[in-house]
Structure formats: C-alpha cells, structure tokens
Amino acid sequence: MPEAPLLSEKPRLRGVLRRTVPFLRPHRGVLAMAIGLGTAATLALTLVPSVVGWAVDRVAGRDGEGLGFAAAAFAGLVLARLILLRSGEIWLAKAGERVVKSLRDLVVSRLATAPLRFLEAQRSGDLLRRSTTEIADLASFVRGDLPDLLSVTGYLLFTTILLLVYSWQLTLVVVLVFLPLSVLVMRWFQRGAGPAFAAEAAAQAAVAATYREGLQAREAIVSRGAEDQWRERFDRDAAEVRKTALRTEFVVLRTGGVTLAQSVADATILVFGGGLVLAWGLPLSTVAVFVVAMRQLFDSTNQLTTLIGQLQTSRTGLARLLDLLDLAERPGGSGRGADVPERGVLEASTVDFQYTAGVPVLTGVSCTFPPGSRTGLVGPTGSGKTTLAKILTGLYPVDGGCVRYAGVPLEEIEPDLLRRRIMLVPQRVHLVAGTLRDNIRLVPDPPPDERIARALEELGLREWAANLPAGLDTPAGDSLSAGERQLVGLIRAALVDPAVLVLDEATADVDPATGDRIERALDRLHAGRSLIVVAHRQSTIDRLPAAVRLESGRVLAGER
Ligand SMILES: Nc1ncnc2c1ncn2[C@@H]1O[C@H](COP(=O)(O)OP(=O)(O)OP(=O)(O)O)[C@@H](O)[C@H]1O
C-alpha cells in the first residue's frame, strides 16, 4: 500500500488565494455587496483632504459662505463614511462567516470520509488544530482585520490618484522618496515573515499534539512512571514555540522602518511644496491637501504593515487548512451502486497488506464467506485478525490481491452502499457524548424510537436497556464497559441490517453476563446474514461452525 500522505509542517503558501477562490464563489453576491460598500466608505475618506483644501481656498478668499459649505461637506463626508463603513463591515462579516462555515462543514465531511490510513498517519493534535483553531483564527481575521485591510488598500490607491490630480510634481516627489523606502522595508519584512510565521504555527501545532497525546495516554504515562519523559518532550516543544514566537516578533519589528521613510517624505514635501508655491505660484490649498493626505497616507501604510503581518498568519493558517482538505479527500472510486446485489459472497483473494513499507502484516490471504455463513477469524495475538477484519469491511485498501463482494471489488462500491452491505463492529465501539439513545441512533437515517425498541426486542436486549439507571436516556460514554459498547454496536447493526456483519470481539472487560448477551444477540442477528467474528474467547470459537485461522499474517490451510 502506498504510504498515507503526511500533512507537512511547511504548508504550500503559493497560490493560496487561487486555491481559496472555489470556496468564495458560492458567496460572491454577499462579497460583492461588502466590497462595494467598503469601497464607497474609502472613497468618502479619500475626499476629506480635498474638502480641507477647498476650505483653505475659501479662507484665503475671505468667503465665509463658501467656508460654511465646506464645513457642511466635511461633516457630510464623515457621516457618510461612518455609515458606509459600518454597513460594509456587517456585510463582510456576513460573507466571511458564510465562507468560514462552508470550510468548517467541508472539513467535517472530509474528515468523516477520509481514508482510515490517512487519519492514523497524522498526529491527532495536528488534525485538531488544523480543523478547529485554524478555522477560528480565519474567522476572527475575516471579522477583525479583513475590513481594515480592504479599506486601507483602497485608500492608498484612491489617495494616490487624488494627489496626482492636484499636482503630479509633488506626487512624483512622494512616490520617489516614500515608495522605494517603504517597498524596501516591506520586502525585508516579507522575506522573513513567511518562514517565521509558518515555523511558529508548526511549533504550536506540535505542542497541541504532544499535549493531547499526553492526556490521552495519561494512564499509561503515570503507570509507567514516564511523566518526566513526557514533560521533557512537552518542554522541548514549548521551547520551540518560544523560539519561533521571538523570531516572529523580531521580523515584525522590521516594519518600524516605514516610520523613518515617512519622516523623510514629510520633510521633502514641505521643502518642495513651499518652493513650488513661491516659485511657480502653486495654490497653498494644494500643499494643504498634500499635508493632510500624506498624514492619512502614512497612517494607512503603518496600519497596512501591521495588517500584512496578520494576513501572513491567516495565509499560513489557510494554507494548512487547504492542505488538510486536499489530502483528506477520499480518492474517487467508480462508485458502483445499483448493480451490487443485496446478498453475495464476500471473498478475499491472495490479499497482501502492510502498514509500514517492508513489514508485511498479511501475505497471500484468501478466504471465502458465502451468504448466511458463520465464520470465526482465529489466531494468536498480532497474527493479523483485526487487520483482516478491517480489510474485509473496506476500511483499508489492499496492497496486493483483491476483496470482492458479490463479485465487485470493494473499492468500486459506492462508500455509503458498502457500509450498508458490510458492517464492522470494532473491538472498542466508539461512543459520543450523549445518551444511549443518541448513540444507538448513530446510523444512516436515524431511526424513530419504535424502531429502536423493536431492534432491542429482536436482539433480546430490551431487559438489559430497561435495567440501566435511566433506560435509553442513561448517559453513555465512560460508564459502559467494552462489552456493553459492543452491544450498542450490535443494536446499530440490527438497525442498518447489513448483509455481512464483522464483529471484532472485545478482548477485555467482558463479564460473563455481557458475553452471554452478545452471543445471544449475535445468534438472533445472524438470521440471513453472513457473520464473521474475530474470536478471542474459546466459547465463541466453539459456537462457530467454520474458522479461518491466521498465523503471522498467513491463513493456515485446512484448519478450522
Ligand atoms: N495501525 C497500525 N499501524 C501499524 N501497525 C499496526 C497497526 N495496527 C496493527 N499493526 C500491527 O499489525 C500486526 C497485526 O495486528 P492486528 O491487530 O491485526 O493483529 P490481531 O491478530 O488482531 O491481534 P489481537 O488478537 O491482539 O487483536 C501487529 O504486528 C500489529 O502490531
């Protein structure tokens, strides 16, 4: 089997915007409205220096009425900008939240259907960070920084045009002095920012992963007395976060160079502007427009450098998220549906499988399970029973050979249909937070209560459920033993009604009464189905009429 792709700590930063466009497309109406309102607000702000220039002219001409109009226009512009700006922000937040929600939905559905090998290959803390924190950061960027970023960029553009209209000579001075200095500073910043932000995000993900792993394995860590090693690992990861965060801060400091460029440009404008007024009779109002506009221009540039820092963080987060979406996508099969009969033979032919290259776990495994058969998968620990069970249910693709159901290779069967035809009840059935009923309902087309009651009756589990402290409303989770969790798995199986049921018998924590319940439920569930049981208990092995015996990943011929 090709090794499952690992999510890289260095996300693909190139083309992030292009990769994001498909996610923006469905929301283009709201986005256009938001950008339109934001642009109008920016235009209003751009006109402020002109109104100041107009007022200076009125003062110079001793025109009191004109000055009153200028003041009214100023107030009108400020009010219009405020209204436009706030409405633009609301629309942008609306658009952003929609985009973020659709990304969140997509992550959930990709992770729900991602190949098992892919999920197993990643550090779970990293997956968690990419699919939660990264999205939350993106949402706060959209709400907080994106409106500012759009307005500042628009403002810089419009103001440059306005200044050109007033005096191309003075604009040229601004451009020649201020622009090259600012561009140099920005490039210096960006050269350091990409790697610095990516390294910080990766270090934070590593801390999250180590922390989560430590919590999950707390019993093992405490019982082995390995707290010190765990703490050491955690300290190492935390030190890396400190180091990378400090590096980011130093990179951000580079943006201070822009202030220097501003002071130089300010002084130059005053000298040149004054000279042009004296020598060529340039109106004083033009110099006033430049002085006001340049102040705003500088403030915007300062704001822009900070925002570009935020943008860099969000770009890295977005890239990490997009990498996850790309890699977690299930490879498209031919998706056969209607032509897979309801009952059929399940057959593994010369199956080879390995988790790690060069370490075979199953070699040339062939076995056949006719409709209605009852077979045990038996063999010593580590012989590959659980692995074979997962391969027979299509959870892992094989490296060599083939598994077919009713003559159709499993990878060609549409996943939803495959899950309805062949179902696995794993050793440790996963339960979600909620009641027993909530957990039983975790099947396609959640069934009504009557259907659940009927399933319990059919499996002989009505009394068991009724005797729980709050019946079906008993909180599930840690209170159920491994055996009882398997009962939940069997109830789900009764509701799905698969043609083949594969049960990976729980190895631990099954008291005799629960064991009897499982066996009775299995007998009742069996009618008309193929049953494959990864059997650990002798009593189960004895009850099954056929067996496939594995030893070191091979089927022992002629064994029952
Ligand atoms: N996710 C995995 N990644 C790498 N190796 C694995 C993985 N799962 C199992 N293995 C290895 O594959 C081999 C077969 O394991 P498997 O769980 O299929 O055996 P088993 O017969 O079911 O054992 P048991 O009876 O203890 O459950 C073992 O050597 C095991 O260490």
Image (cartoon, rainbow, N blue to C red):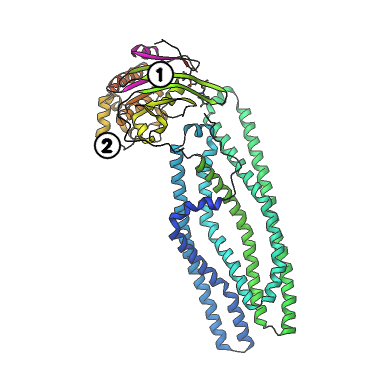
Q: Residue furthest bottom?
A: 62
Give the SS element for disc 1: strand
Question: Viewer-proximal residue, 360 or 525?
Answer: 360
Residue at screen point 45% across, 61% down: 91
- Above or below, 7 against 370 in this view is below
Amino acid type, label 2: Pro
Answer with left or right where residue 308 lies relative to residue 147. right
Q: Earlier in the sequence, mark 1 or mark 2?
A: 1
Within-10-Å neighbours for mark 2: few <14, some 14–19, many 20+: few
In the rendered structure, find residue 112 and report the number of the disc placed on it: none
Spatial separation of the CA atoms under disc 1 and disc 2:
38 Å
Residue 443, quarter of picture: top left
Q: Are marks 1 and 2 in contact (CB under 8 Å)?
A: no
Residue at screen point 51% across, 56% down: 143
Amino acid type, label 1: Cys
Give the SS element for disc 2: loop
Q: Position of residue 430 (x, y in %)?
A: 42, 30
What residue does disc 1 label? 367
**Closer mark to the observer between disc 1 and disc 2:** 1
Answer with left or right where residue 46 lies relative to residue 411. right
Question: Viewer-proximal residue, 214 or 454?
Answer: 454
Answer with left or right where residue 245 lies relative to residue 488. right
What residue does disc 2 label? 448
Q: Position of residue 164 (x, y in %)?
A: 64, 74
Residue at screen point 47% across, 32% down: 116
Q: Which region shows up in magenta?
A: 527-550
Residue at screen point 62% across, 31% down: 231
